[in-house]
Amino acid sequence: MGSGTCHSSYPHRLFQQSVRTASSVSRGGVGVSGKMFFVTGAKSAGGASSGGGATSVWTEESVCIVVNSTITADVNCSYSCGSDCWRGSKYPCLQVYVSVNTTGRLSRLSHNEESWDSNFECFYVPKCQKDTAAMHHMIVNISERLKPHQQVPCYYDPSDRQESALLTRLYGHSAVFYSLFWPSCMLTGGTAIIFMVKLTQYLSIMCEQVVKIKR
């Protein structure tokens, strides 16, 4: 048997097994980052058609004056009570109308894009739960903070495609950047690891061939 550094021994086989493990892990990281890109893209596509999502149309910031804040009829919702189990509940709908200073337009105010997507008629849509009193108490507390003539920051659609205004935004430019930044890092790092693993495997095969030739 030869004595070269490329000798095919147990440590060498252990090294190859470690390389294969690293390759599997890196492929998993690339797969996760790819799924994250898919989810982000799906949100962007959904937002383009509905007004919410990562491509929010509420891009201009302004100051809104609360004109009216009223709790109207209850809205039905459902919550999970276990595997394949759903039960009904209700939450009060808080309708808030504001006057946008920049345009002078009367608009219905929503908390953010997700609230608008869930129910654009209500300012805030709480997470549905069995305790209806807790949801009612939450909505009452919000209504007390949105009294008439109160000024609040808001966002509106400058193209007037959406008549509603938002109190806060979830999908601004910074949110899109950070949602894509980490998947990009994972994708780049995973690809680099796969490349190094493949290169190591290639050099290992070449090394074994050299040992066989020397024998």
Image: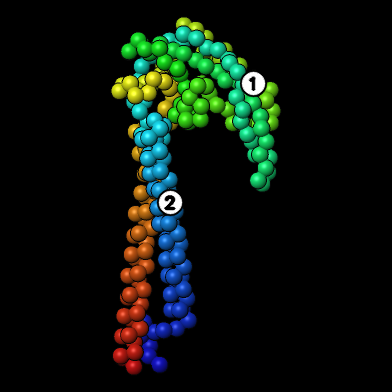
What secondary structure is found at the residue carrying circle 1? Answer: helix
Q: In screen coordinates, is 168 left or right of 143?
A: left
Query: For the C terminus, which image quadrant?
Result: bottom left
Distance in Å between CA atoms under marks 1 and 2: 38 Å
Coordinates of residue 172 in the picture (x, y in percent): 37, 31
**Residue 113 — which label?**
none
For residue 180, what is the image quadrant?
top left
Q: In screen coordinates, is 74 left or right of 44?
A: right
Asked whether 78 or 39 is in front, the reply is 78
Q: Residue at x 37, y 67 (%)?
A: 197
Q: Is residue 173 above or below residue 210?
A: above
Query: For the N terminus, which image quadrant?
Result: bottom left
Q: Residue at x 52, y 16 (%)?
A: 95
**Residue 35 — which label?**
2
Specify the amino acid type for callout 2.
Lys
Coordinates of residue 118 in the picture (x, y in percent): 51, 30
Residue, disc 1: 136
